[in-house]
């Protein structure tokens, strides 16, 4: 693997911990799934097979959204969707009757899943376009992060008075010049450290 990455000059760029906003594209899809699934499924009870089937069909819905413009020329290729990268073609399904208005006690297990999926589709396609707005989180003006600045490390599980104090020792500006990642130096008591069982000669071999 290392030889392959070296030959093709591939560099890994990892997102910093506790920063899901760095994965904007896939995190927005996860948000779509959770947002509508919670409202559609609500207090319904599924078996494992039923829930698995429903989730897979919802995945097909989300992976069928367009990610390239539709051309006016009928001779142009079809617009790309995430499904093209999964199976090499558009995700399609057979036409089916609308059963959203039919009482659940008149439906089979399969039809019940289809009804819930249709409810998901009806909610999703109506709200999806309204959610396609510009994300301003990193475009609005904020105080500039500078090296040697003293900061508090926010932790969701402890009160603010127990947040750790640290100093920014390095900043990493993005291609647009905005700093989104920093290296922070903190102080820790030795009693709070847990040594890993790594041989000393291994560590020496890894030193530059």
Image (cartoon, helix red, strand yellow):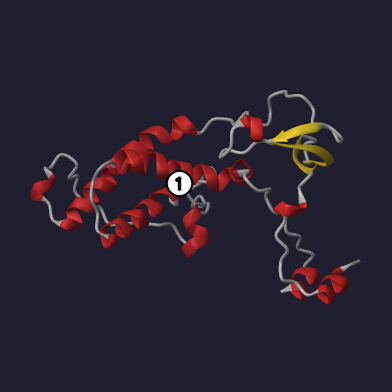
Q: Identify the residue at image location x=51%, y=33%.
A: 132
Closer to the camera, 90 or 43?
43
- Check disc 1 and report the residue beneath it: 65
Q: Residues within 10 Å of mark 1 (few under 14, many from 20)?
A: some
Q: Disc 1 on helix, strand or loop?
A: loop
Left or right? Give the position of 189 relative to 99. Answer: right
Residue 192 at x, y = what percent? 70, 52
Query: Which quarter of the rendering shows the N terminus?
Result: bottom right
Q: Name the outermost residue toward the right.
A: 208
Residue 119 at x, y = what percent? 27, 41
Q: Name the outermost residue toward the left.
A: 106
Residue 21 at x, y = what percent? 60, 41
Q: Identify the residue at image location x=19%, y=48%.
A: 97
Q: Identify the residue at image location x=72%, y=23%.
A: 141
From the viewer's perspective, is residue 119 above or below residue 63?
above
Closer to the camera, 188 or 72?
188
Query: Which quarter of the rendering shows the C terminus?
Result: bottom right
Quadrant in the picture for residue 19: top right
From the viewer's perspective, is residue 150 above or below residue 113?
above
Q: Identify the residue at image location x=80%, y=32%.
A: 150
Quadrant in the picture for residue 3: bottom right
Residue 178 at x, y = what percent? 77, 34
Q: Name the outermost residue toward the front.
A: 191
Closer to the camera, 113 or 65?
113
Q: Give the number of callouts.
A: 1
């Amino acid at each position: 693997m290392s030889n392959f990455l070296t030959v093709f000059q591939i560099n890994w760029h990892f997102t910093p911990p506790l920063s899901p906003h760095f994965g904007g594209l896939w995190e927005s899809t996860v948000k779509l799934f959770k947002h509508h699934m919670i409202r559609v499924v609500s207090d319904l009870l599924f078996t494992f097979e039923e829930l698995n089937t429903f989730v897979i069909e919802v995945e097909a819905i989300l992976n069928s959204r367009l990610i390239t413009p539709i051309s006016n020329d009928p001779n142009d290729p079809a617009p790309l969707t995430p499904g093209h990268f999964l199976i090499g073609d558009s995700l399609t399904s057979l036409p089916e009757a609308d059963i959203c208005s039919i009482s659940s006690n008149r439906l089979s297990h399969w039809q019940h899943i289809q009804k819930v999926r249709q409810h998901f589709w009806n909610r999703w396609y109506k709200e999806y376009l309204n959610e396609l707005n510009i994300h301003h989180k990193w475009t609005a003006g904020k105080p500039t992060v500078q090296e040697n600045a003293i900061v508090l490390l926010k932790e969701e599980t402890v009160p603010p008075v127990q947040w750790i104090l640290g100093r920014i020792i390095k900043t990493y500006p993005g291609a647009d010049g905005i700093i989104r990642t920093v290296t922070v130096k903190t102080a820790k008591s030795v009693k709070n450290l847990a040594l890993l069982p790594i041989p000393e000669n291994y560590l020496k071999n890894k030193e530059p």
